[in-house]
Amino acid sequence: MRTLLRLAKFRQRLSELGADGAIVTSRENVAYLTGFSGSAGTLVIAPGRAYLVTDGRYEIRAREVAKGYRVTLGKSLADVVNELPGRPRLAYEPTHLTDSRLSELQAGVRRAELRPESRVLEEIRAVKDPDEIALIERAAAIADEAWAALQPSIVPGVTEVELSNQLEAAMKARGASGVGFDSIVASGPNSAIPHHETGDRRIREGDFITFDFGALYKGYRSDMTRTVFIGEPTEKHREVYNAVYRAQVDSAAMIAPGVSGEDVANKAREIIKEAGYDKYFTHGLGHGVGRDVHELPGVGRGTIFEPGHVVTVEPGIYLEGWGGVRIEDTVFVTRSGSRPLTTSPKPAWPSPPGTVDG
């Protein structure tokens, strides 16, 4: 099973760090290692044994999915740790353990040595296995299908929140278990706000409308942004949109094993700078996507792409009071290059709403 292979990889990394085992409290990391996604679940991993500590609400589900783990009910985390032989050195996740829970654990543990280790599993999760790629690809396909279905509804007079609700309902109707994150529908001057909170503004002629959305499918997420225009564009509308389009397409095309994330990000920024809008590109180029919508690796300094990475590429230009454009795809790094998992058309000039073929 994939989860047992992931556990073996985690054990190897812990050994390299000088730890005998770990306490895993992040819900997403627990699900990654076990397949169990209940709200009450902590792992205690030690030499030769691994425990899933949960409660009676989840006993049946935990025993069904957490193969290779001893499902433990009705015990405190400290009690489970104290049952381990010897004086094991256990790593814990400092960003996923509250101060009060850590203090309680430290007070209750008698022999084990607890040491903080950040992002160990997050770094492992950055390289997806084939099962994960298949789930992200299906989440992306659901979002693509929902986007196509939404097109006839993008008309003057409809509100941002009405479009958001329709888009999210279309994803769920196509098999999504939920949304990948809070959908963004940003129209007119609101499109100049990268993380606008979707509201009651009505769509008007002359608006850019930015849609940033994704589907959640069996624990994995997709992420895509498309920008459309209502009415007859001015030359400035075309200039801004096409600068973002070229930056997105050309930088995404660079992604391949061994390529620097910094080089990819610099390419996008160079194109936007040449168009005269560099100071209006105000965020990073992209991020990893998987069990979380923002995870490793980033698309920038410190990243060298590897097969199995899944990242977004999402340049934007934001002109306060006027409007903005962002275009984004989820991209999978293959052994020989990369390919987009989100495949909705993004023509060099946005299609009129109601069409998706440019």
Image: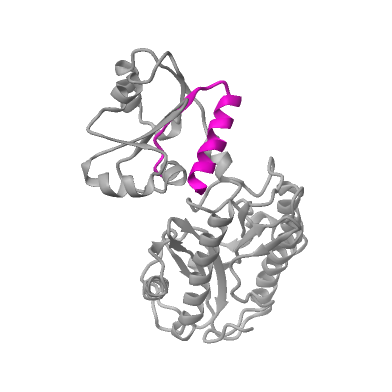
Residue 278: quadrant of the picture? bottom right
Could you say which is closer to the camera, residue 336 or residue 209? 336
Instruction: Report if residue 224 lies within the magenta region.
Output: no
Number of marks drawn: 0
Residue 154 at x, y percent in the picture: 46, 82
- Quarter that holds the C terminus: bottom right
Instruction: Please tell me which residue is depicted at 51% across the width and 83% down the height of the picture.
Output: 205
Q: Which residues are magenta?
A: 1-27
Question: Would you place residue 246 above or below residue 87 in this image?
Answer: below
Instruction: Please tell me which residue is depicted at 41% across the width and 67% down the height of the picture.
Output: 176
Residue 67 at x, y percent in the picture: 40, 44
Position of 140 compared to 251: left or right?
A: left
Could you say which is closer to the camera, residue 1 or residue 111? 1
Residue 34: quadrant of the picture? top left
Question: Would you place residue 291 above or below residue 10 in this image?
Answer: below
Residue 101: quadrant of the picture? top left
> Can residue 276 be seen by looking at this rendering?
no
Position of 48 compared to 273: left or right?
A: left
Residue 228 at x, y percent in the picture: 56, 77
Residue 25 at x, y percent in the picture: 39, 35
> Can residue 135 be seen by looking at this rendering?
yes
Rendering colour mode: one colour
Instruction: Please tell me which residue is depicted at 44% across the width and 61% down the height of the picture.
Output: 216
Question: Would you place residue 189 above or below residue 202 in this image?
Answer: above
Instruction: Report if residue 5 lies within the magenta region.
Output: yes
Position of 196 compared to 77: left or right?
A: right
